[in-house]
Image (tube, rainbow, N blue to C red):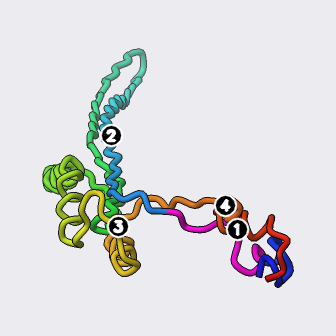
Amino acid sequence: MIKHGGGYSKFCERYGDYYLAGYRIGGETGILLSTTSFSSRTDETYGVTATLEVLFFEASKTWTKDFHEANSGQSVKLLGYDTLQGQNWNSSTTGDGVQVFKKQTLQVLSRSQSILNRVVAALSEHGVSDQKGLTNEQCDRLAEAGLVVELLLSPMSSLREVRRWMLEDNII
């Protein structure tokens, strides 16, 4: 197509100007844990004074009542993702649920700390070893398993074969 089908620009129109040169294999876990606590106190005092005046005598009585109100609480929010398990977390809780939520959060943190071991185990499970090429089927399975964290793209013009065909003037 480069030589006889309209040149490099037509080739790029049809196939694109970049190709998939490789995968960055691994796994990612990202976690954001935030906590909030609050407390407030309201004090109110109400008073009533009654005054009685009879002839030249005056008497008064005052009654007061104090009202106190206090509020406090806490909330925890967990945001995160795990590429190996294809999970996303977006949950929060308040009040008494914080202790239950704490257990779930510790499990998520444990998963994130063991990411390297989990990636190595998953690669082994898919038959991937160091310095060994991958088949197209293995590449597809790695992507489906969440082990591909980045696609490495390169320009088509950097391929030796494309350069050769672009510069060659031989019609055969």
Question: Which image quadrant for residue 25?
Answer: bottom left
Residue occupying image coordinates x 74% and y 81%: 14
Residues at discs 3 and 4 in contact (Cβ within 8 Å): no
- At label 1, the amino acid type is Val
Say which mark, if any, is on residue 82: none
Question: What stretch of residues is rendered in magenta?
Answer: 11-21
> x%, y% of residue 15?
69, 78
Q: Residues within 10 Å of mark 4 (few under 14, many from 20)?
A: few
Specify which label sits upstream in the sequence, 3 or 4.
3
- At label 4, the amino acid type is Pro
- At label 2, the amino acid type is Thr
> x%, y% of residue 89?
33, 61
Residues at discs 4 and 1 in contact (Cβ within 8 Å): no
Residue 7 vs residue 132: left or right?
A: right
Q: CA distance from mark 3 to mark 4?
A: 22 Å
> x%, y% of residue 142?
34, 71
- At label 3, the amino acid type is Gly
Question: Which image quadrant for residue 126?
Answer: bottom left
Q: Nearer the viewer, residue 142 or 11?
A: 11
Mark 4 sits on what residue?
155
Specify which label sits upstream in the sequence, 4 or 1.
4
Residue 39 vs residue 164: left or right?
A: left
Q: CA distance from mark 3 to mark 2?
A: 50 Å
Specify which label sits upstream in the sequence, 3 or 2.
2
Mark 1 sits on what residue?
162
Q: CA distance from mark 4 to mark 1?
A: 10 Å
Say which mark, if any, is on residue 36: 2
Q: Which of the image's four quarters has the N terminus?
A: bottom right
> x%, y% of residue 4?
83, 83
Residue 103 vs residue 22: left or right?
A: left
Mark 3 sits on what residue?
133
